[in-house]
Amino acid sequence: MIHSMTGYGASEAELPDGRILRSEIRTVNHRHLSVSVSLPRGWDSLRPRVVEQVRAALARGGVSVSVSCQHLEAEDPAMPALDMDRARRFVLLLREAGAELGLAGGIDIDTLVRLPGVLRSGTHGTQGQEEGADGDTLAACLDAALAGVIEMRAGEGRRLEEVLLASIARIVEEVDSVESRAPQRLLRERDRLRERVAGLTEKVEVDEDRLAREIAYLAERWDIAEEVARLRSHVALFLESLDGGGSGGRKAGKRLGFVVQEMNREANTLGAKANDAGISASAVAIREELERLREQLENVE
């Protein structure tokens, strides 16, 4: 089964300190796998790990990963906070210094809040230290979001597969039509040549041997048996890849695109050799379906 490259997944997890970690993953079509990651401040060291986790789950597509870290609604991350541990440490150090150096005076609240780091603004969810990062929780949160992405891409893939199979069925119908018309056009050409020769030579008897050689020459020049056989072979390979054979259903997008390219090459040759209105029309119809296939395959993983 093929997968689309369009998908979305989201997940939330609670960190030990009460913060809520939310991950969102969006994917769109892309020729290769391209991953962009947005992490909370202080979590940048986990970026390579996030990229590898995405690469292990997805084969192709433009992937956008957004991770945010917030406190519960009851808490305001913009509220200032007092670091009591830091305050106590400053008071202890200053008292020790005063006693050792024989300095008089005390520490008031105004002095205390001016000391670096004692009174902080908006510490929740905005601290720039790596100690706020939790790699294991992030990995679990991303796994859940990726599961949602894969599920959505699989559903889109099933719908895409129906469209692709419908186009392939129409191509097979046109190839059948071409194969049935091919012998008739040689007979019509033989009769046309006979009439033209008879008209030019009037009552002179037509050289059947020479006419047969001309027909043989035309048959060789217009022979489309090889193109028809290759088209059927490419159709079989397309269906095999679509069903998960060869390179695998989930990662068959590039392989299917190559097969369509080869089918288009044979369809062009078929049209060039047609010399028949019906076969020419079938060649055009095949190329139209191949273009539809190509457009749809741009979104297949």
Image (cartoon, rainbow, N blue to C red):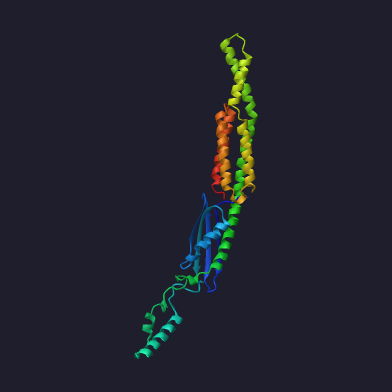
- Residue ranking furthest to the top: 203
Q: Is residue 62 above or below residue 134?
A: above
Residue 106 appears anywhere in the view: no
Residue 186 on image: x %, y % = 62, 23
Q: Judge by depth and name the residue closer to the eye, 132 or 148.
A: 132
Q: How many marks?
A: 0
Q: Residue at x 57, y 35 (%)?
A: 266
Residue 220 on image: x %, y % = 60, 25
- Quadrant in which residue 88 is drawn: bottom left
- Quadrant in which residue 190 is drawn: top right
Q: Is residue 294 above or below residue 42?
A: above
Residue 141 on image: x %, y % = 56, 65
Residue 176 appears anywhere in the view: yes
Residue 212 on image: x %, y % = 63, 18
Q: Residue at x 59, y 56 (%)?
A: 150
